[in-house]
Image (tube, grey):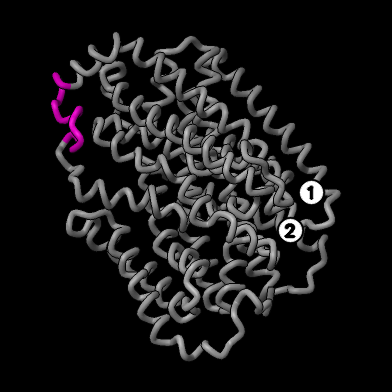
Protein backbone atom coordinates (compact mmCIF):
# COMPACT_ATOMS: atom_id res chain seq x y z
CA UNK A 1 0.00 0.00 0.00
CA UNK A 2 1.16 3.55 -0.77
CA UNK A 3 0.59 4.90 2.75
CA UNK A 4 2.05 8.35 2.09
CA UNK A 5 -0.48 8.69 -0.72
CA UNK A 6 -3.39 7.18 1.18
CA UNK A 7 -3.14 9.49 4.21
CA UNK A 8 -4.07 12.69 2.25
CA UNK A 9 -6.98 10.79 0.70
CA UNK A 10 -8.19 9.70 4.14
CA UNK A 11 -8.01 13.32 5.35
CA UNK A 12 -10.02 14.35 2.29
CA UNK A 13 -12.71 11.77 3.12
CA UNK A 14 -12.85 12.96 6.74
CA UNK A 15 -13.53 16.53 5.56
CA UNK A 16 -16.26 15.26 3.24
CA UNK A 17 -17.93 13.33 6.08
CA UNK A 18 -17.79 16.39 8.35
CA UNK A 19 -19.59 18.43 5.70
CA UNK A 20 -22.19 15.68 5.36
CA UNK A 21 -22.79 15.65 9.12
CA UNK A 22 -23.16 19.44 9.20
CA UNK A 23 -25.59 19.33 6.27
CA UNK A 24 -27.62 16.72 8.13
CA UNK A 25 -28.46 19.31 10.80
CA UNK A 26 -30.18 21.35 8.06
CA UNK A 27 -32.05 18.27 6.85
CA UNK A 28 -33.28 17.52 10.37
CA UNK A 29 -34.40 21.07 11.19
CA UNK A 30 -35.84 22.25 7.86
CA UNK A 31 -39.51 23.12 7.40
CA UNK A 32 -39.50 21.57 3.91
CA UNK A 33 -37.66 18.27 3.69
CA UNK A 34 -38.13 17.96 -0.09
CA UNK A 35 -36.80 21.45 -0.86
CA UNK A 36 -33.81 20.96 1.45
CA UNK A 37 -32.91 17.34 0.74
CA UNK A 38 -33.24 17.50 -3.06
CA UNK A 39 -32.41 21.19 -3.83
CA UNK A 40 -30.51 22.51 -0.81
CA UNK A 41 -33.17 25.16 -0.19
CA UNK A 42 -32.36 26.88 -3.54
CA UNK A 43 -29.57 28.85 -1.84
CA UNK A 44 -26.49 28.22 -3.99
CA UNK A 45 -24.23 31.19 -4.69
CA UNK A 46 -22.13 31.65 -7.83
CA UNK A 47 -18.98 29.81 -6.73
CA UNK A 48 -20.83 26.82 -5.29
CA UNK A 49 -23.13 26.65 -8.33
CA UNK A 50 -20.12 26.63 -10.67
CA UNK A 51 -18.29 24.01 -8.65
CA UNK A 52 -21.30 21.71 -8.26
CA UNK A 53 -21.96 21.84 -12.02
CA UNK A 54 -18.30 21.09 -12.75
CA UNK A 55 -18.06 18.37 -10.14
CA UNK A 56 -21.29 16.76 -11.35
CA UNK A 57 -20.30 16.95 -15.01
CA UNK A 58 -16.59 16.19 -14.50
CA UNK A 59 -16.87 12.60 -13.43
CA UNK A 60 -14.77 9.44 -13.33
CA UNK A 61 -15.14 9.53 -17.10
CA UNK A 62 -13.27 12.86 -17.24
CA UNK A 63 -10.52 12.02 -14.77
CA UNK A 64 -10.04 8.29 -15.29
CA UNK A 65 -11.82 7.11 -18.45
CA UNK A 66 -11.09 10.20 -20.59
CA UNK A 67 -7.30 10.18 -20.08
CA UNK A 68 -7.39 6.42 -20.70
CA UNK A 69 -8.96 6.94 -24.12
CA UNK A 70 -6.59 9.83 -24.92
CA UNK A 71 -3.70 7.50 -24.03
CA UNK A 72 -4.77 5.19 -26.87
CA UNK A 73 -5.99 7.75 -29.46
CA UNK A 74 -3.70 10.76 -29.10
CA UNK A 75 -4.25 14.51 -29.41
CA UNK A 76 -7.36 14.04 -31.55
CA UNK A 77 -9.22 12.97 -28.40
CA UNK A 78 -8.09 16.18 -26.65
CA UNK A 79 -9.60 18.24 -29.48
CA UNK A 80 -12.80 16.22 -29.26
CA UNK A 81 -13.00 16.61 -25.48
CA UNK A 82 -12.75 20.40 -25.68
CA UNK A 83 -16.34 20.54 -26.93
CA UNK A 84 -17.15 20.31 -23.22
CA UNK A 85 -15.78 23.81 -22.60
CA UNK A 86 -19.12 25.64 -22.97
CA UNK A 87 -21.22 22.95 -21.22
CA UNK A 88 -22.01 24.98 -18.11
CA UNK A 89 -22.47 28.15 -20.18
CA UNK A 90 -25.04 26.46 -22.43
CA UNK A 91 -27.01 25.03 -19.51
CA UNK A 92 -27.22 28.26 -17.54
CA UNK A 93 -27.79 30.52 -20.55
CA UNK A 94 -30.38 28.32 -22.29
CA UNK A 95 -32.30 27.34 -19.15
CA UNK A 96 -31.14 30.23 -17.01
CA UNK A 97 -33.50 32.69 -15.37
CA UNK A 98 -36.69 31.43 -16.98
CA UNK A 99 -36.19 27.88 -15.77
CA UNK A 100 -35.42 29.04 -12.23
CA UNK A 101 -38.39 31.44 -12.13
CA UNK A 102 -40.80 28.75 -13.30
CA UNK A 103 -39.32 26.23 -10.84
CA UNK A 104 -39.99 28.65 -7.99
CA UNK A 105 -43.44 29.61 -9.25
CA UNK A 106 -44.64 26.01 -9.32
CA UNK A 107 -42.35 24.77 -6.51
CA UNK A 108 -40.86 22.16 -8.85
CA UNK A 109 -38.02 20.17 -7.32
CA UNK A 110 -37.01 17.84 -10.16
CA UNK A 111 -36.83 18.05 -13.94
CA UNK A 112 -39.79 15.67 -14.12
CA UNK A 113 -41.70 18.08 -11.86
CA UNK A 114 -41.19 20.75 -14.50
CA UNK A 115 -42.29 18.44 -17.32
CA UNK A 116 -45.39 17.40 -15.35
CA UNK A 117 -46.44 21.00 -14.84
CA UNK A 118 -45.58 21.99 -18.41
CA UNK A 119 -47.32 19.14 -20.23
CA UNK A 120 -49.82 17.86 -17.63
CA UNK A 121 -49.22 14.25 -18.70
CA UNK A 122 -48.84 11.18 -16.50
CA UNK A 123 -47.32 9.30 -19.44
CA UNK A 124 -44.50 11.84 -19.69
CA UNK A 125 -43.84 11.54 -15.96
CA UNK A 126 -43.62 7.74 -16.06
CA UNK A 127 -41.55 7.65 -19.23
CA UNK A 128 -39.18 10.31 -17.91
CA UNK A 129 -38.71 8.39 -14.67
CA UNK A 130 -37.92 5.18 -16.57
CA UNK A 131 -35.40 7.00 -18.79
CA UNK A 132 -33.64 8.58 -15.82
CA UNK A 133 -33.44 5.33 -13.88
CA UNK A 134 -32.24 3.25 -16.86
CA UNK A 135 -29.63 5.64 -18.25
CA UNK A 136 -28.37 7.04 -14.96
CA UNK A 137 -27.94 3.50 -13.68
CA UNK A 138 -25.34 3.07 -16.42
CA UNK A 139 -23.70 6.37 -15.52
CA UNK A 140 -23.60 5.56 -11.80
CA UNK A 141 -22.07 2.20 -12.59
CA UNK A 142 -19.23 4.04 -14.36
CA UNK A 143 -18.60 6.12 -11.22
CA UNK A 144 -18.53 3.08 -8.91
CA UNK A 145 -16.06 1.39 -11.27
CA UNK A 146 -13.86 4.51 -11.46
CA UNK A 147 -13.68 4.91 -7.70
CA UNK A 148 -12.92 1.24 -7.21
CA UNK A 149 -10.18 1.31 -9.88
CA UNK A 150 -8.53 4.21 -8.06
CA UNK A 151 -8.59 2.52 -4.65
CA UNK A 152 -7.43 -0.74 -6.25
CA UNK A 153 -4.42 1.00 -7.83
CA UNK A 154 -3.42 2.70 -4.58
CA UNK A 155 -3.87 -0.09 -2.09
CA UNK A 156 -3.32 -3.33 -3.96
CA UNK A 157 -6.68 -4.55 -2.65
CA UNK A 158 -8.88 -6.61 -4.92
CA UNK A 159 -11.31 -4.76 -7.19
CA UNK A 160 -14.30 -6.15 -5.27
CA UNK A 161 -13.00 -4.97 -1.89
CA UNK A 162 -12.13 -1.56 -3.32
CA UNK A 163 -15.62 -1.29 -4.81
CA UNK A 164 -17.33 -1.90 -1.46
CA UNK A 165 -15.03 0.60 0.32
CA UNK A 166 -15.81 3.31 -2.20
CA UNK A 167 -19.54 2.60 -2.30
CA UNK A 168 -19.83 2.66 1.50
CA UNK A 169 -18.02 6.01 1.71
CA UNK A 170 -20.31 7.68 -0.82
CA UNK A 171 -23.58 6.22 0.44
CA UNK A 172 -23.04 7.30 4.04
CA UNK A 173 -22.58 11.00 3.43
CA UNK A 174 -25.14 11.29 0.62
CA UNK A 175 -27.85 9.58 2.67
CA UNK A 176 -27.32 11.75 5.74
CA UNK A 177 -26.68 15.11 4.04
CA UNK A 178 -28.81 15.28 0.89
CA UNK A 179 -28.39 17.96 -1.80
CA UNK A 180 -26.76 20.54 0.49
CA UNK A 181 -24.03 18.06 1.44
CA UNK A 182 -23.59 17.25 -2.25
CA UNK A 183 -23.33 20.94 -3.25
CA UNK A 184 -20.94 21.93 -0.45
CA UNK A 185 -18.68 18.92 -0.95
CA UNK A 186 -18.76 19.69 -4.67
CA UNK A 187 -17.26 23.11 -3.89
CA UNK A 188 -14.35 21.40 -2.13
CA UNK A 189 -14.09 18.66 -4.72
CA UNK A 190 -14.29 21.02 -7.71
CA UNK A 191 -11.47 23.15 -6.32
CA UNK A 192 -9.31 20.06 -5.78
CA UNK A 193 -10.09 18.90 -9.33
CA UNK A 194 -8.79 22.16 -10.87
CA UNK A 195 -5.65 22.36 -8.72
CA UNK A 196 -4.90 18.64 -9.08
CA UNK A 197 -5.19 18.83 -12.88
CA UNK A 198 -2.63 21.65 -13.09
CA UNK A 199 -0.18 19.91 -10.74
CA UNK A 200 -0.35 16.58 -12.59
CA UNK A 201 0.03 18.25 -16.01
CA UNK A 202 3.19 20.03 -14.88
CA UNK A 203 4.56 16.86 -13.26
CA UNK A 204 3.91 14.79 -16.41
CA UNK A 205 5.67 17.31 -18.67
CA UNK A 206 8.70 17.40 -16.38
CA UNK A 207 8.83 13.59 -16.12
CA UNK A 208 8.69 13.29 -19.92
CA UNK A 209 11.62 15.66 -20.44
CA UNK A 210 9.53 18.53 -21.76
CA UNK A 211 6.90 18.94 -24.46
CA UNK A 212 9.40 18.60 -27.34
CA UNK A 213 10.76 15.29 -26.07
CA UNK A 214 7.26 13.90 -25.45
CA UNK A 215 6.02 14.94 -28.90
CA UNK A 216 9.09 13.35 -30.52
CA UNK A 217 8.44 10.09 -28.68
CA UNK A 218 4.79 10.10 -29.78
CA UNK A 219 5.73 10.69 -33.42
CA UNK A 220 8.31 7.91 -33.25
CA UNK A 221 5.68 5.46 -32.01
CA UNK A 222 2.83 6.58 -34.29
CA UNK A 223 2.69 9.93 -36.17
CA UNK A 224 -1.12 9.84 -35.95
CA UNK A 225 -0.90 10.45 -32.21
CA UNK A 226 -0.30 14.16 -32.88
CA UNK A 227 -2.97 14.59 -35.57
CA UNK A 228 -6.67 15.41 -35.06
CA UNK A 229 -7.68 12.03 -36.49
CA UNK A 230 -6.70 9.51 -33.80
CA UNK A 231 -4.15 6.71 -33.72
CA UNK A 232 -5.98 4.76 -36.44
CA UNK A 233 -7.57 7.71 -38.24
CA UNK A 234 -10.93 6.91 -36.67
CA UNK A 235 -11.72 10.47 -35.51
CA UNK A 236 -13.10 11.82 -38.77
CA UNK A 237 -14.33 15.45 -39.02
CA UNK A 238 -17.95 14.23 -39.23
CA UNK A 239 -17.61 12.02 -36.17
CA UNK A 240 -15.90 14.74 -34.12
CA UNK A 241 -18.42 17.43 -35.10
CA UNK A 242 -21.37 15.19 -34.22
CA UNK A 243 -19.68 14.07 -31.00
CA UNK A 244 -19.75 17.73 -30.00
CA UNK A 245 -23.55 17.49 -29.94
CA UNK A 246 -23.22 14.83 -27.23
CA UNK A 247 -20.81 16.61 -24.90
CA UNK A 248 -21.48 20.24 -25.84
CA UNK A 249 -24.90 21.57 -26.81
CA UNK A 250 -26.78 18.43 -25.78
CA UNK A 251 -25.72 18.77 -22.13
CA UNK A 252 -28.78 21.03 -21.69
CA UNK A 253 -30.85 17.84 -21.78
CA UNK A 254 -29.04 16.10 -18.91
CA UNK A 255 -31.35 16.03 -15.85
CA UNK A 256 -28.46 15.95 -13.35
CA UNK A 257 -27.10 19.21 -14.84
CA UNK A 258 -30.42 20.90 -15.59
CA UNK A 259 -31.59 20.55 -11.98
CA UNK A 260 -28.65 22.78 -10.95
CA UNK A 261 -30.32 25.60 -12.88
CA UNK A 262 -33.24 25.35 -10.42
CA UNK A 263 -31.16 25.71 -7.28
CA UNK A 264 -29.16 28.95 -7.48
CA UNK A 265 -29.92 31.93 -5.26
CA UNK A 266 -30.19 34.87 -7.71
CA UNK A 267 -29.23 36.17 -11.16
CA UNK A 268 -25.89 37.47 -9.90
CA UNK A 269 -25.01 33.97 -8.72
CA UNK A 270 -25.87 32.56 -12.14
CA UNK A 271 -23.70 35.07 -14.01
CA UNK A 272 -20.75 34.48 -11.69
CA UNK A 273 -21.16 30.71 -12.08
CA UNK A 274 -21.02 30.99 -15.87
CA UNK A 275 -17.63 32.76 -15.72
CA UNK A 276 -16.07 30.59 -13.02
CA UNK A 277 -17.49 27.38 -14.45
CA UNK A 278 -16.28 27.97 -18.01
CA UNK A 279 -12.71 28.69 -16.86
CA UNK A 280 -12.63 25.73 -14.48
CA UNK A 281 -14.16 23.17 -16.83
CA UNK A 282 -11.81 24.29 -19.61
CA UNK A 283 -8.82 23.76 -17.33
CA UNK A 284 -9.98 20.32 -16.24
CA UNK A 285 -11.06 18.93 -19.61
CA UNK A 286 -8.07 20.21 -21.55
CA UNK A 287 -5.59 19.35 -18.81
CA UNK A 288 -6.76 15.82 -18.01
CA UNK A 289 -7.12 14.67 -21.61
CA UNK A 290 -3.76 16.18 -22.57
CA UNK A 291 -2.23 14.37 -19.59
CA UNK A 292 -3.55 11.10 -21.02
CA UNK A 293 -1.68 11.68 -24.30
CA UNK A 294 1.53 12.91 -22.66
CA UNK A 295 1.50 9.87 -20.35
CA UNK A 296 2.16 7.45 -23.21
CA UNK A 297 5.95 7.96 -23.44
CA UNK A 298 6.25 8.46 -19.67
CA UNK A 299 4.35 5.29 -18.74
CA UNK A 300 4.22 2.94 -21.75
CA UNK A 301 2.45 -0.40 -21.95
CA UNK A 302 -0.70 0.24 -19.87
CA UNK A 303 -3.29 -2.32 -20.99
CA UNK A 304 -6.30 -1.06 -18.97
CA UNK A 305 -6.91 2.58 -19.85
CA UNK A 306 -8.71 3.36 -16.59
CA UNK A 307 -5.44 2.78 -14.69
CA UNK A 308 -3.39 5.35 -16.62
CA UNK A 309 -4.19 8.36 -14.45
CA UNK A 310 -3.63 6.81 -10.97
CA UNK A 311 -0.46 4.95 -12.04
CA UNK A 312 0.94 8.05 -13.75
CA UNK A 313 0.31 10.15 -10.64
CA UNK A 314 2.18 7.67 -8.46
CA UNK A 315 5.09 7.67 -10.92
CA UNK A 316 5.66 11.40 -11.55
CA UNK A 317 4.75 13.06 -8.24
CA UNK A 318 6.10 12.82 -4.68
CA UNK A 319 3.85 10.61 -2.52
CA UNK A 320 2.24 13.35 -0.44
CA UNK A 321 1.53 15.48 -3.52
CA UNK A 322 0.26 12.40 -5.36
CA UNK A 323 -2.21 11.82 -2.53
CA UNK A 324 -3.58 15.33 -2.93
CA UNK A 325 -3.76 15.03 -6.74
CA UNK A 326 -5.48 11.64 -6.55
CA UNK A 327 -8.11 13.29 -4.41
CA UNK A 328 -9.15 14.99 -7.69
CA UNK A 329 -10.44 11.86 -9.47
CA UNK A 330 -11.82 10.64 -6.16
CA UNK A 331 -13.61 13.97 -5.81
CA UNK A 332 -14.86 13.86 -9.40
CA UNK A 333 -16.15 10.35 -8.99
CA UNK A 334 -17.78 10.92 -5.62
CA UNK A 335 -19.35 14.23 -6.61
CA UNK A 336 -20.89 12.80 -9.76
CA UNK A 337 -22.21 9.64 -8.17
CA UNK A 338 -23.71 11.52 -5.23
CA UNK A 339 -25.48 13.91 -7.62
CA UNK A 340 -26.82 10.98 -9.62
CA UNK A 341 -27.94 9.19 -6.47
CA UNK A 342 -29.84 12.27 -5.32
CA UNK A 343 -31.40 12.68 -8.77
CA UNK A 344 -32.56 9.06 -9.09
CA UNK A 345 -33.77 9.07 -5.48
CA UNK A 346 -35.77 12.27 -6.08
CA UNK A 347 -37.24 10.72 -9.23
CA UNK A 348 -38.48 7.69 -7.36
CA UNK A 349 -39.63 9.52 -4.22
CA UNK A 350 -40.96 12.82 -5.54
CA UNK A 351 -42.13 11.86 -9.03
CA UNK A 352 -43.38 8.30 -8.45
CA UNK A 353 -44.02 7.72 -4.71
CA UNK A 354 -45.64 11.09 -3.96
CA UNK A 355 -47.53 11.39 -7.23
CA UNK A 356 -48.93 7.89 -7.61
CA UNK A 357 -48.32 5.74 -4.53
CA UNK A 358 -48.79 7.87 -1.41
CA UNK A 359 -49.67 11.52 -2.18
CA UNK A 360 -50.66 12.13 1.46
CA UNK A 361 -47.31 10.93 2.88
CA UNK A 362 -46.09 12.78 5.96
CA UNK A 363 -42.69 14.44 6.18
CA UNK A 364 -41.40 11.55 8.29
CA UNK A 365 -42.59 9.01 5.71
CA UNK A 366 -40.96 11.00 2.90
CA UNK A 367 -37.66 11.09 4.81
CA UNK A 368 -37.78 7.36 5.42
CA UNK A 369 -38.62 6.63 1.79
CA UNK A 370 -35.80 8.89 0.57
CA UNK A 371 -33.19 7.19 2.74
CA UNK A 372 -34.38 3.70 1.79
CA UNK A 373 -34.52 4.45 -1.93
CA UNK A 374 -31.07 6.09 -1.98
CA UNK A 375 -29.53 3.12 -0.16
CA UNK A 376 -31.28 0.53 -2.33
CA UNK A 377 -30.25 2.18 -5.59
CA UNK A 378 -26.65 2.54 -4.44
CA UNK A 379 -26.40 -1.12 -3.47
CA UNK A 380 -28.03 -2.23 -6.73
CA UNK A 381 -25.44 -0.30 -8.74
CA UNK A 382 -22.66 -1.95 -6.75
CA UNK A 383 -23.92 -5.38 -7.82
CA UNK A 384 -23.93 -4.36 -11.49
CA UNK A 385 -20.42 -2.89 -11.15
CA UNK A 386 -18.94 -6.21 -10.04
CA UNK A 387 -17.91 -7.02 -13.65
CA UNK A 388 -16.51 -3.74 -15.02
CA UNK A 389 -15.52 -2.90 -18.62
CA UNK A 390 -11.95 -1.87 -19.45
CA UNK A 391 -12.91 1.74 -20.20
CA UNK A 392 -15.71 3.30 -18.16
CA UNK A 393 -15.94 6.35 -20.43
CA UNK A 394 -18.20 4.42 -22.83
CA UNK A 395 -20.72 3.68 -20.07
CA UNK A 396 -20.91 7.35 -19.19
CA UNK A 397 -21.25 8.52 -22.79
CA UNK A 398 -23.99 5.94 -23.43
CA UNK A 399 -25.97 7.39 -20.53
CA UNK A 400 -25.34 10.97 -21.73
CA UNK A 401 -26.65 10.22 -25.21
CA UNK A 402 -29.76 8.44 -24.00
CA UNK A 403 -30.77 11.19 -21.60
CA UNK A 404 -30.17 13.93 -24.17
CA UNK A 405 -32.17 12.12 -26.85
CA UNK A 406 -35.11 11.83 -24.45
CA UNK A 407 -35.13 15.21 -22.68
CA UNK A 408 -33.47 18.00 -24.64
CA UNK A 409 -36.44 19.10 -26.77
CA UNK A 410 -39.14 18.56 -24.17
CA UNK A 411 -37.20 20.92 -21.89
CA UNK A 412 -35.95 23.55 -24.35
CA UNK A 413 -39.06 23.77 -26.54
CA UNK A 414 -41.23 23.46 -23.46
CA UNK A 415 -39.61 26.62 -22.12
CA UNK A 416 -39.52 28.71 -25.28
CA UNK A 417 -42.11 27.46 -27.79
CA UNK A 418 -45.75 28.19 -26.82
CA UNK A 419 -47.09 25.62 -29.31
CA UNK A 420 -45.15 22.76 -27.71
CA UNK A 421 -47.64 20.28 -26.25
CA UNK A 422 -47.84 16.90 -24.59
CA UNK A 423 -48.42 15.02 -27.85
CA UNK A 424 -45.30 16.48 -29.43
CA UNK A 425 -43.29 15.84 -26.26
CA UNK A 426 -44.44 12.21 -25.98
CA UNK A 427 -43.71 11.50 -29.65
CA UNK A 428 -40.31 13.18 -29.38
CA UNK A 429 -39.30 11.29 -26.23
CA UNK A 430 -40.37 7.92 -27.64
CA UNK A 431 -38.56 8.62 -30.91
CA UNK A 432 -35.41 9.79 -29.16
CA UNK A 433 -35.17 6.86 -26.76
CA UNK A 434 -36.19 4.16 -29.24
CA UNK A 435 -33.94 5.36 -32.05
CA UNK A 436 -30.97 5.88 -29.75
CA UNK A 437 -31.14 2.38 -28.29
CA UNK A 438 -31.74 0.83 -31.72
CA UNK A 439 -28.78 2.61 -33.33
CA UNK A 440 -26.50 1.92 -30.38
CA UNK A 441 -27.31 -1.81 -30.56
CA UNK A 442 -27.52 -2.32 -34.32
CA UNK A 443 -25.43 0.35 -36.08
CA UNK A 444 -23.23 2.46 -33.81
CA UNK A 445 -21.70 5.50 -35.52
CA UNK A 446 -24.14 5.15 -38.41
CA UNK A 447 -23.00 7.06 -41.53
CA UNK A 448 -19.80 7.92 -39.65
CA UNK A 449 -21.68 10.06 -37.09
CA UNK A 450 -21.96 9.68 -33.36
CA UNK A 451 -24.88 7.52 -32.23
CA UNK A 452 -26.75 10.44 -30.64
CA UNK A 453 -26.96 12.56 -33.81
CA UNK A 454 -29.91 11.01 -35.65
CA UNK A 455 -32.03 10.51 -32.50
CA UNK A 456 -31.66 14.19 -31.53
CA UNK A 457 -32.41 15.47 -35.04
CA UNK A 458 -35.32 13.06 -35.53
CA UNK A 459 -36.85 13.79 -32.12
CA UNK A 460 -36.76 17.54 -32.89
CA UNK A 461 -38.55 17.11 -36.21
CA UNK A 462 -41.13 14.77 -34.68
CA UNK A 463 -41.74 17.18 -31.81
CA UNK A 464 -42.44 20.09 -34.16
CA UNK A 465 -44.57 18.12 -36.61
CA UNK A 466 -46.75 16.44 -33.96
CA UNK A 467 -47.15 19.61 -31.89
CA UNK A 468 -48.31 21.58 -34.93
CA UNK A 469 -50.62 18.77 -36.05
CA UNK A 470 -52.27 18.50 -32.62
CA UNK A 471 -52.23 22.18 -31.70
CA UNK A 472 -55.99 22.51 -32.14
CA UNK A 473 -56.61 19.70 -29.62
CA UNK A 474 -54.97 21.64 -26.79
CA UNK A 475 -55.77 25.18 -27.95
CA UNK A 476 -58.76 25.43 -25.58
CA UNK A 477 -56.79 24.35 -22.49
CA UNK A 478 -55.46 26.98 -20.05
CA UNK A 479 -51.93 28.15 -20.81
CA UNK A 480 -49.46 26.12 -18.82
CA UNK A 481 -48.13 29.13 -16.89
CA UNK A 482 -51.62 29.73 -15.51
CA UNK A 483 -52.48 26.04 -15.06
CA UNK A 484 -51.31 24.64 -11.73
CA UNK A 485 -53.02 21.29 -12.21
CA UNK A 486 -51.27 18.67 -10.05
CA UNK A 487 -48.49 21.09 -9.15
Residue lying at 49% horizontally and 45% vertically, measured from the top left: 88
Is 313 magenta? The answer is: no
Quarter containing the C terminus: bottom right
- Element type at mark 2: helix
Which quarter of the picture shows residue 431?
A: bottom left
Q: Position of residue 376 (x, y in %)?
A: 63, 55
Residue lying at 31% horizontally and 69% vertically, measured from the top left: 458
Q: Which mark is residue 323?
A: none
Q: Which residues are magenta?
A: 219-231
- Element type at mark 1: helix
Is 226 magenta? The answer is: yes
Q: Which mark is residue 27?
A: 1
Vertical arrangement, residue 353 with respect to residue 486, above or below: above
| Mark toward the start of the polypeptide (2 vs 1) | 1
Residue lying at 46% horizontally and 68% vertically, measured from the top left: 413
Q: Position of residue 129 (x, y in %)?
A: 54, 66
Q: Position of residue 203 (x, y in %)?
A: 40, 14
Q: Residues within 10 Å of mark 1 (few under 14, many from 20)?
A: many
CA–CA distance between discs 2 and 1? 9 Å
Residue lying at 71% horizontally and 33% vertically, measured from the top left: 17
Q: Residues within 10 Å of mark 2 (few under 14, many from 20)?
A: many
Q: Position of residue 114 (x, y in %)?
A: 60, 67
Q: Is residue 191 visible to the viewer in this orientation of the structure?
A: yes
Vertical arrangement, residue 161 with respect to residue 442, above or below: above
Q: Is residue 184 left or right of residue 122?
A: right
Q: Which mark is residue 34?
A: 2
Which quarter of the picture shows residue 433?
A: bottom left
Amino acid sequence: MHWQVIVPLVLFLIIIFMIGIWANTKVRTTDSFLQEYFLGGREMGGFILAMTMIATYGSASSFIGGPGVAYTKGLGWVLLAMAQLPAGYFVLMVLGKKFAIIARKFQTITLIDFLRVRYNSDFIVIMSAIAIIVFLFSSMMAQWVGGARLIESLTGLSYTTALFIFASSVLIYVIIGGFRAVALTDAVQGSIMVIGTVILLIGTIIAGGGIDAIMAALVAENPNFITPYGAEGELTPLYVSTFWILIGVGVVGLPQIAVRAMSYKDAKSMHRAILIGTIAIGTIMFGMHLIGVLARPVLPGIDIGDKVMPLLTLKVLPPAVAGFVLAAPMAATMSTVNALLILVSSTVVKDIYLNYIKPEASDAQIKKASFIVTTTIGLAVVLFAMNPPDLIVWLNLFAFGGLEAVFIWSVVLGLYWPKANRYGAIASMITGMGLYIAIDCLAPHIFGMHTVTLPIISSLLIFIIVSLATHSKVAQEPHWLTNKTKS
